[in-house]
Image (cartoon, rainbow, N blue to C red):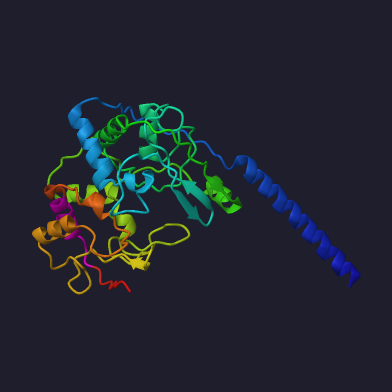
């Protein structure tokens, strides 16, 4: 019996040493750096380019919902000013804070080059070449639209606001060491895209700019990976009044919420804005979409394979 306990004790000691060495290794190596291609994207002072950037940032891209101080907490009534960051996202593996994306040179993006900002949007890497947690799904955005976004951000009034650094627990550091990597768009992002009412442009808006696919597809809560048919809904989101379940946007005649709608119905619904209190849908942003963009989204969603997936909010 004593011999057995002695062997067990040695095994536990060896295991503890292995775990200890592994954790030390993680602590000193989790900030992996990656080389990603240069984009060659340079900001413009052209008023039309800046206007396009404002439309993307404040509208379909809804960047202010995470980067404005009251954006996330007041999706429907937020002031849409500032974008000085600092909004905390508490995750199982740590706390992430939205960045200050005003032009302040000390605490915002004023000290970063156009290329640094473009690489962040294109590949989800920081200015120091470490990988970001991929909250932003703009990797497939066209070069022209990334240029427009950066051009608009350069015009935003600087606000000095030192955002806390991301805090990762050990689980988060393990994820950063072995899981987080630069994101490469598949298919490759276009140089530019024709803005019309086509299915192709609707798909671009829904997947590369508006990120409709991320909320209207069921996902694994731990990994964020899609576990259901895209756009078929079912993803559960917490709100002030409980849990919101995203609806099925495929044209299934029985369970698709927009299956029987005409393009005019779709446009009218967006113009109406929020009708459900505390909905996590950023209606205030999406209300500003042009009629043609809304029609493109409608035609794309109606081109999808119908999926029978009944999703009803409690």
Q: Main secondary structure of the magenta part?
A: helix
Q: Is residue 294 above or below residue 145?
A: below
Side of 139 where 25 appears, left or right: right
> What residue is rendered at 12% in x and 49% in y?
291
Q: Nearer the viewer, residue 221 or 167?
A: 167
Q: Residue furthest right?
A: 2
Side of 239 where 162 appears, left or right: right
Q: Is residue 31 above or below residue 207?
A: above
**Residue 295 location, x and y as percent?**
13, 53
Magenta residue span: 294-306
**Total numbered labels placed on residues in the image:** 0
Quadrant containing the N terminus in the rendered view:
bottom right
Q: Nearer the viewer, residue 247 or 218?
A: 247
**Residue 24 location, x and y as percent?**
68, 45
> What residue is rendered at 10% in x and 58% in y?
263
**Residue 140 location, x and y as percent?**
30, 43
């Amino acid at each position: 019996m004593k011999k057995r306990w002695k062997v067990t004790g040695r095994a536990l000691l060896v295991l503890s040493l292995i775990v200890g060495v592994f954790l030390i290794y993680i602590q000193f190596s989790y900030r992996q750096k990656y080389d990603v291609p240069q984009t060659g994207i340079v900001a413009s002072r052209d008023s039309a380019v800046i206007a396009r950037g404002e439309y993307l940032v404040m509208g379909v891209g809804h960047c202010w919902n995470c980067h404005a101080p009251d954006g996330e907490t007041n999706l429907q009534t937020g002031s849409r000013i500032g974008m000085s960051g600092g909004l905390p996202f508490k995750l199982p593996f740590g706390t992430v804070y939205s960045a200050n994306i005003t032009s302040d040179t000390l605490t915002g993006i004023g000290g970063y080059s156009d290329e640094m900002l473009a690489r962040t949007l294109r590949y989800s890497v920081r200015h120091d070449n470490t990988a970001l947690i991929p909250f932003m799904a703009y990797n497939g955005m066209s070069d022209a639209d990334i240029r427009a976004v950066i051009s608009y951000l350069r015009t935003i009034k600087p606000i000095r606001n030192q955002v806390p650094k991301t805090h990762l627990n050990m689980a988060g550091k393990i994820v950063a060491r072995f899981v987080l990597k630069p994101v490469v768009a598949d298919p490759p992002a276009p140089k530019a895209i024709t803005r019309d009412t086509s299915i192709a442009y609707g798909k671009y808006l829904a997947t590369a700019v508006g990120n409709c696919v991320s909320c209207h597809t069921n996902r694994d809560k731990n990994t964020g990976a899609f576990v259901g048919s895209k756009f078929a809904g079912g993803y559960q989101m917490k709100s002030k009044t409980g849990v919101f379940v995203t609806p099925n946007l495929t044209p299934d005649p029985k369970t698709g919420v927009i299956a029987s709608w005409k393009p005019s119905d779709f446009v009218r619904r967006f113009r109406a804005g929020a009708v459900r209190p505390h909905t996590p849908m950023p209606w205030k942003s999406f209300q500003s979409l042009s009629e043609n963009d809304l029609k493109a989204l409608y035609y794309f969603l109606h081109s999808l394979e119908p999926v029978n997936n009944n999703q009803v909010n409690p």
